Image: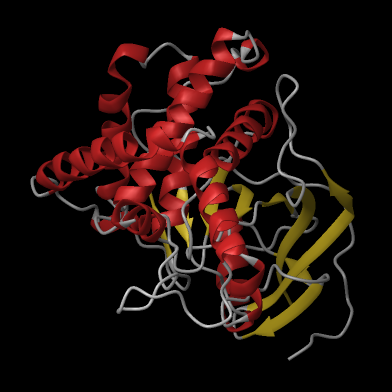
Amino acid sequence: MSDVTTFVRGLGGRGARTTQGHFPLGATMSSLIRQFSQALQCLTHSDKSSRASPQLEQAAQMKQQLDNQTAQLQTNPAAFLPGITARRLADGTLLMAPTSRHAAADLAAACLREDIRRVVDLRSAHEKSRGYGSVLDGHSCNVAGPRGVAHFGRVGKEGPLHAVGPHLPAPDSHVRRVEVTLSRNGTTLDRDGRAAPGQVQDLSLIRMPVGSEKAICASRLFDVSVHLAKAGQTQGGTTAFQCADGGHVAATFAAASALLRRHLRGAVSPARMDEAILNECLRIRASRPDVFRTEDLASLRAFADQMLEAERRGELQGLLHTKPLPATLAPAKPPRTVTRPVPQSPARS
């Protein structure tokens, strides 16, 4: 039973047993078995429990290699963004925590300056309602502050994520369009803070509930990575991954997305997939050295298996025109300018 307990705890199921080894009051054997089965399937993309121990053992070995190589890295001091809790990676991707209404103008300015076109929201419903809220949550809003009025306007209805093959994205995922502006004295501003009438930044808000309290399902990594690979072909710009603390979960999804794109352009050998995963993690650790747990690496290995399986079935053919990843951060493209009146509704405090 010790192996089962260890595995469940490694998946984020801490607290399933008391320190004395007894099941807590109110817990039933059937619920524990169901939780274990769901966690196992998420991690291994399989219903075969015999794969659990090798997966975690190999992930633990990778974690040791990652830690050893991280000790030789130099962090990037330019990775911090002003006003919001966010780090910029070498390819321009952002890892960030939720932004409160108090920093709404800083977020709007970052959307313009960094050309943010996609925000992947990875918080669980529990996290959203328990202290990790964001100005992007809920309805459209105007937030006034010393820097001006930040506007986040929801446009249209929620839609499904892009998919490949017969696989459907998680049913609780969706994407929605948001228009972002920063204005002063009724005039919108550009990325440099200068008056630019009609300046609007189009943003795709991609919702994929995960949370930091449990292991990440490989299928959810796959869903987001496929959607981003397709969306990036037409939208361009920067992607921001948002989780409760801007840490492990955001970094794991960023690594999976980059791994798929590199694989699509032939830069990853299936025979050296573990090495490719480590390289992606090292790129991210150069800006955020405290991310990636053992279970995150296990989820990335399971994601890579699903990615290769989809390729064998020919389901990735539609993604082959994905643009290559830049070796270094390129200057951000100017946001799209459209002629559209700026909302003049009263700001809410």
Identify the residue at horizontal 75%, vertical 33% (top origin). Answer: 168
Identify the residue at horizontal 37%, vertical 78% (top origin). Answer: 18
Which colouring convention does the figure follow?
Answer: secondary structure
Residue situated in front as seen by the camera: 53 or 285: 53
Q: Quadrant of residue 187?
A: bottom right
Would residue 267 be found to the left or right of residue 45 on screen?
left
Residue situated in front as seen by the camera: 86 or 282: 282
Q: Quadrant of residue 262?
A: top left
Q: Quadrant of residue 315?
A: top right
Report x, y in % for residue 282.
25, 40
Residue situated in front as seen by the camera: 92 or 39: 39
In which quadrant of the rendered image does the N terminus lie? bottom left
Would residue 263 be found to the left or right of residue 90 on screen?
right
* Residue 191 visible somewhere in the drawing: no
Report x, y in % for residue 218.
52, 38
Q: Is residue 322 above or below residue 79?
A: above
* Residue 159 visible somewhere in the drawing: yes
Identify the residue at horizontal 46%, vertical 73% (top origin). Answer: 83
Residue occupying the far bottom of the picture? 349
